[in-house]
Image (cartoon, rainbow, N blue to C red):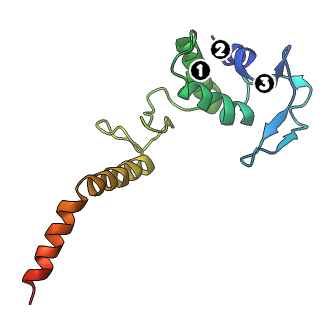
C-alpha cells in the first residue's frame, strides 16, 4: 500500500482522486484550503498538512484494523519519501513521534520521559501517603 492508497481508504478529503481541501484547526474550526481545493491528491509527491495532522496519528493510534500492517507501511513510505525522515529514525513508544535525540537504549522522548516520571511520583505518593506523613512527623518531633 502506498500513501495515495491510504488516503483513498481513510482520508475524508479524498474524492475520486480529487482533494476537497477541508482543513481542521486545533479548535476544531474548519476552512477550505484553496491551494488544495479541487486539485488532484498530492500525497505521493508533496506534503499534505491534513494527512500529517489527521491520518498519520490515526494510523499510529489504531490497534485493531484488518489492514494495519499495510497502513503502517504506507505511513513509513510517506515519511521516508515525502517528508524525508530516515527509516532508522527511532520513535517514542508513548507519543509515537520520530525522535532524533533517542539513543539506542532509550524508549521515550524527553517530554514523555518527564511526564512518566511525574506520573510515577504521583502514584508513589498516593500509595504511600500515610508512611510519608509518619516519617515527616517523626522527623519534626526529633528536631529541637
Residue at figure coordinates x 92%, y 26% from the top left: 38
**Upstream in the sequence, badge 1 or badge 2?**
2
- Quarter of the figure with the N terminus: top right
Task: Look at the numbered disc 1 and give the secondary structure of its residue.
Answer: helix
**Going from the N terminus, do you reach mark 1 or mark 3 first?**
3
Asked which quadrant contains residue 42, the reply is top right
In the figure, is residue 50 to the left or right of 88?
right
Tell me whether the residue at label 1 lies in contact with that at label 2, contact meaning CB atoms closer than 8 angstroms.
yes
User: Where 41 sits versus 95, above or below?
Assistant: above
From the viewer's perspective, is 118 left or right of 16? left
> In terms of depth relative to the viewer, which is nearer, 132 or 121?
132
Identify the residue under disc 1: 77
Q: Residue at x 37, y 48 (%)?
A: 116
Compute the Cα span from label 1 to label 3.
20 Å
Q: Which residue is mark 3?
A: 12
In the rendered image, the vertical position of residue 122 relative to residue 30, given as above or below: below
Can I make out residue 44 in this image?
Answer: no
Gap in angstroms between the C-alphas marked 1 and 2:
7 Å
Q: Residue at x 44, y 51 (%)?
A: 111
**Front position among marks 3 and 2:** 3
- Precedes in sequence: disc 3 or disc 2: 2
Tell me if mark 1 has few (under 14), some (14-19) or many (20+) residues whose alpha carbon lies within 10 angstroms of its own.
some
Q: Could you say whether the residue bearing mark 2 is in a helix, strand or loop?
A: loop
Say which of marks 1 and 3 sits in front: 3
Residue 101 location (% of width, % of height): 41, 45
Q: Position of residue 3 (x, y in %)?
A: 67, 19
**SS state under label 3:** loop
Amino acid at each position: 500500500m502506498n500513501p495515495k492508497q491510504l488516503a483513498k481508504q481513510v482520508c475524508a478529503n479524498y474524492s475520486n482522486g480529487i482533494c476537497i481541501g477541508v482543513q481542521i484547526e486545533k479548535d476544531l474550526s474548519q476552512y477550505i484550503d484553496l491551494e488544495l481545493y479541487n486539485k488532484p491528491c498530492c500525497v505521493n509527491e508533496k506534503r499534505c498538512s491534513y494527512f500529517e495532522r489527521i491520518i498519520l496519528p490515526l494510523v499510529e493510534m489504531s490497534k485493531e484494523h484488518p489492514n494495519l500492517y499495510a497502513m503502517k507501511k504506507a505511513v513509513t513510505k510517506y515519511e521516508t519519501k515525502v517528508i524525508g525522515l530516515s527509516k532508522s529514525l527511532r520513535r517514542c513508544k508513548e507519543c509515537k513521534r520520530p525522535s532524533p535525540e533517542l539513543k539506542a537504549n532509550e524508549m521515550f522522548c524527553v517530554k514523555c520521559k518527564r511526564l512518566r516520571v511525574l506520573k510515577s511520583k504521583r502514584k508513589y505518593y498516593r500509595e504511600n501517603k500515610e508512611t510519608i506523613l509518619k516519617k515527616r512527623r517523626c522527623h519534626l518531633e526529633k528536631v529541637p
